[in-house]
Amino acid sequence: MTESENKFLVFSVGEDLYASPLLSIREVLEYQIPKPMPNMVHYFTGVINVRGAIVGVIDLRTKFGHEAKNWPRTPFLLCDTARGAIATIVDSVDRVQTFTEEQIERHPPVATKIEQNYLIGVAKSSHELITLVDMEKLLNEQEYKKVSGE
Amino acid sequence: MKMNKISLKGRMMVLVGIMLLAQGLLIGVAVQKSSSLLTTLNNVTGQQMPSERILAHIDMLHDTVRSIVLGSYFSDVTNDRASLVDFQKELVKTDALFQDDFKKMEVLEISAVTKQKMKVVNGWINDYLASGKLIVDNLVVGQPKKANAEYATFTNHFKKLEKDLEIFEEEVNKDTRIVGDQGKDIVVYLVVTSSVGFVFSIFFSLFIFNWTRKSFEGILGKISNTAQLISKSTISVMRESTKVKDSAVEQSAAIQESVSALSEMSSMISQTGQNVRISIDTALTANEKSADGKKIMEHLSHAMSSIQKANTSLQDISKVIDNIVNKTTVINDIVFKTQLLSFNASIEAARAGTHGRGFAVVAEEVGNLAELSGAAAKEIEQLLVESQRRVRDTLEVIQDRVGDGYKVSQNAHQVFEEISINIEQINGQIKSIGEATQQQEVGVQQANTAMKQMDESSQSNTEAALVAQSTAEQLKKDCNTLYKVFDELMLLVNGHQLKKINSRSSNATAYSSGSLENSNHLDSSGEDDSELQGLVRNIASKQNEWGSDDLNADLNHAGGVDRSHFKKVV
Amino acid sequence: MEIDNELLISFCDEAMDVLIRWERICLDLALGFNIDLVEELFRIAHNIKGGSRAVQLFDFGNYLHQVEDVINLIMDGKLDLSDPIQNELLRSQKFMTDWVDRLKKGNLESPDFMKQIQPLALIVDLLKPATSTPEKNQQHALNRESLANSKSSGTAGQRGDLTERPSPLSKVSSEAKLEKQNSNSVSASKNSGSHNETIRISAQKLDHILQTIGELSIHQTILFHGRSEVSATNHVFHKSLQLSQKLTRDLYDKALGLRMQPLESLFQRLERSTIELSRSLQKPIQFSSEGSEVELDKTVVEKIIDPLTHILRNAIDHGIETPEQRQLLNKSEVGRIEISAKQDTFGVLITIQDDGKGLDHEKIKAKAIEKNLLKPNQEISTKEAFQLIFQPGFSTAEKVTEVSGRGVGMDVVRKVLEDISGKIEIESQVNQGTKFSIILPTSVNIIEGMLVQLHGQTYVIPISAVDEVINVQGSETRRIHHSAILPIVDLRNLLQVNPEFRQTSTHDEAMSVVICLHRGIQIGFLVEKILGQHQVVIRPLNENIESSFGILGGTILGNGEPGLILDLAVLSDFYLNRTQPLKELA
């Protein structure tokens, strides 16, 4: 476990705190109004311009079933997936935190809203419970095209 | 009435002509008739004589013949042959004489019937003679028996002949008588036709005369009407001119009054003018006072606005605070961006692995600094908000106070303005009054002049009126003269009823003079028409008096026509 | 040291040019010794030296002096142009290139050239006879001078004599079917000939011009679109505008054309890499290239250098077997690398072909399963298998070499290619070889786009897809147009977006219809407004979003917003077929 692998970026979605390994995230971006893209899933908000590249935007809050409020400082998390870059909207980015192994519980018995695939575990830090997710995995699987039933 | 258009001369000519023609015709006819009668008479006479003669001759002859025959018998008996032969010769001679006579008769102008009869008679005569001859011859020859046989025939013939001769004689006489009758007829006829012609001439000439007279009277009537009109007009003129004269006099009097009134006005106007000047002065003074008041108000206003300016500076302070607040927003943005930057730096550092360790520290520090800045910025913001609030409150208070003061001064200012305006208006009005007064004066002057002119013209009017009046009178006189003439004419036309006419003419005179009087009377009454009509009726009734023979009736009728004509005109 | 900047820049530019030539000469010399080339090399060195001294780059000059000495020795025959020497010459070229680069960037500090010089100096000292007579030295100097002063225009000299040692490298030029020498000289003359026809322009200046032209083009478009505001009776204006539009377009096209570079320099680089690699890996490789005259946009060329180099490296490293292995397989000892470029209507096709061991798709599959990129029983075609090597982290190399094997290369290659709307395909046969085909659109990534408004947002429609534009009332659903029924399809219904973005318009608003002729049928697409026309650079969408229905690509609009480019062909097909209801999209 290298040092970098213990570093997490802590962000909040709704009332909950999440964290993702720093390596899974390319960059944190300032908010842009996404340009809507037709015929995509409902949590696909649109596309934005990231230094000349067109990147799709997923609203994690909507995806996780929270209310999506846009205020000027809503940040994007830019992640690279195998299929290209994707940006996700979260409610706020709080800090970079290093978790020690002790703090991380790899297989929590708690059932969360999120699928187990990309769930790394849960971390405890000063009375807070932080859900550790792997953004890359989270975003890797998705098909954002609208399909029937969605 | 076309006929009327034919001139009198013409009519006369026509009349004469027709009369001549009629007479001529009549004479001619009479002459012709008498000449034919004469001829017939002559014929008859000529006829009668010869015819009588002849008849007598025939009578004689036949007597002769009888005697011859008888004689021949005698002779026979006596056998006086020589006398028989003589008798025969005589018989032949008588025969010849008969023949001659008949021939003579044939020549006579006798009627065809008579001629016919004559022929018949001639025939009988011939038969008689023949038989006579026969007898004689027989006797000559000595055949007394044959002669005797014949003698019965002869005697028949002789009787017949006598009868026939008588008849024939009667016939001839009848003819004569006819002619005589004819003559008588002609005379009667002549007499009748002459009378008729005469009567007709009389009628015709009367008719022509009347006709002429009517036209004449018509013209005269017109003349009369015209004269009437002239008279009326004259009367009017007279009336009017009198009126004019009167009114001119009145006018003159009125003008005099006006002149005096104007002079009164003039003096009043000058009085007004003086008053105006006084008012103007008063207004000016008032204006000055109000201007002073305004100045005072303006000072107050300035004082207010300087307070307002102070207010503005406070507002500026407020703005500055706002700007600062905005800047803190900028700072906050920067803080946020810095945070992001620190995150990104951390990410990059993590990627760089071991090489990025130092950088990671840097990133953390940056993050911390960002937080500190953020906190500080927040505090600043709060302080600013507080200050902002305080400033605002103060501002409000000042605003209110100043606002009030300002309002008051504004109001006062307004009032002074209004006063000033009013004074201006008054001034203006006064000025206009002054101007009006001046104009009045001018007007009065003009009026005066006009009055004078009017006076002059009214005077000339009066003179004119008088002239008109006299002219009218003259005219009236002329009119009367005209009437007289008219009457004369009427007289002439109606001609032979001298007396009546005279009375008429006197009436006419009375009429004309009456008309004059009436006209004077009319000055006041103005009812000339009915008067005229009355007079006309007068005349008409007078006319009625004049006679009842046809001619008069005719005249009346004519006069009546005239009257109606008059009426029409009236 | 005060150095005049302009002079310096122009020196650097000149130096770069001649250094390219230097490289070429070295590569040609690798095929066979040619005294003319060597002399030319000498002249180049001498020129640069003079030039560097003129701009007071004395260190540079000194360095070059040493190089000159070496070349001189070669000219005198005292030094054989062996591989190491050749390498050295190449290396010095690289060194100098880097140095000039630094100078251009403003770094006037001389690199540690002493280190570089050392081997050269050594060589010189070793070979220069200590007993060289002054006359000889003078002779040398005179020779140098005469050589320096003579200006050869690259005639086909016949003075070349070959070295005894067979050169492991050979270059086949397919342009001339002459013998090696002739072809050498011919290619040399050809290359030098082509240089004389050029004018050196600073790339920066050109970029500026291009930028300005680009802006002009945009404003021309705006102007052109504003022409409806000008009275139609103003004929002079309209004519002029028409002409102006045409000229601007021409200008833009030509300007873009200016950016076109022949692939020659690229190929030269690849050739050099091949030689270097072949030397370092001890694998004799024959390099052949074809189609170096094919031109590509400058940026494209710059971008594909690295991917192509990477592919080349892979090919040489992993593809081409060692001579021994090849012998075992009855292949010729000398491996072959063939690079070709061909211009097509669609673009440029660049192929890198090796006759190495080829790709084993089974192995690839196994690796993929190992890396969880593939499910164990998943069936994929060979082609798909080959595409797997573009996955990040994928490498079937047993060991990581310095050159390659990290597995971080191929995915980058694909990414880079995608960025410029290029595609890469792989054909391979085990033991036969592998062929990488790279298809690059010439400048398809720049299109004329018509900006339209839908849901209040700006979208782009390629002008090439638009037949005509007309105005309609919002409520029309069909209309007679050119004596045929024109169905009017509301694009907003086809392109469903999340409700918060949706906008409806009142039905009687005047709107525009973009008419597209698809498969001979005209279809009108209703848009809210036509906003303008723009030249637009197509940026490919990454996989996450590329499958969006009816979107053929993206671009960055003038205001920085991303703009989605609509694929009217797909939308037309959808409308015409309507095999699926709107919710389900293939």
Image (cartoon, coloured by chain):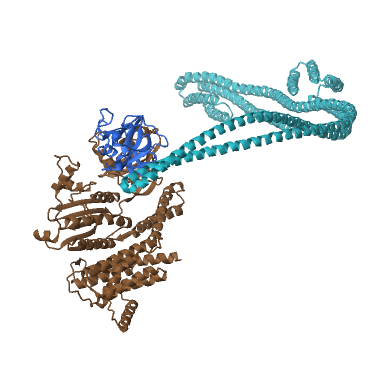
Chain colours: A blue, B cyan, C brown
Q: Residue at x 86, y 26 (%)?
A: B247
Question: What is the x, y in percent for residue C427?
Answer: 17, 52
| Above or below for C518 versus B284 | below
- Residue B214 image offset from top left, x and y in percent: 74, 25
Query: Where on the picture, by quarter, is residue C484?
Result: top left
Where is residue B319, by image quadrant? top right
Q: Is residue B195 left or right of residue C18?
A: right
Q: Residue furthest front?
A: A102
Reply above or below: A140 against B127: below
Would you say residue B467 is visible in this rendering? no
Tell me the quadrant of the picture where the N terminus of chain C can be found. Answer: bottom left
Horizontal arrangement in the rendering, residue C179 relative to residue B323 (left or right): left
Pick whichever, C586 or B141, lies toward us: C586
Q: Position of residue C424 (x, y in %)?
A: 23, 51
**Which quadrant of the figure contains the C terminus of chain C?**
top left
Q: Nearer the viewer, residue C551 or A122?
A: A122
Find residue B246 and report its horizontal and vertical position in percent.
88, 25
| Whether residue C318 can be seen here | yes
Q: Is residue C24 left or right of residue B130?
A: left
Q: Is residue C408 left or right of residue B407?
A: left
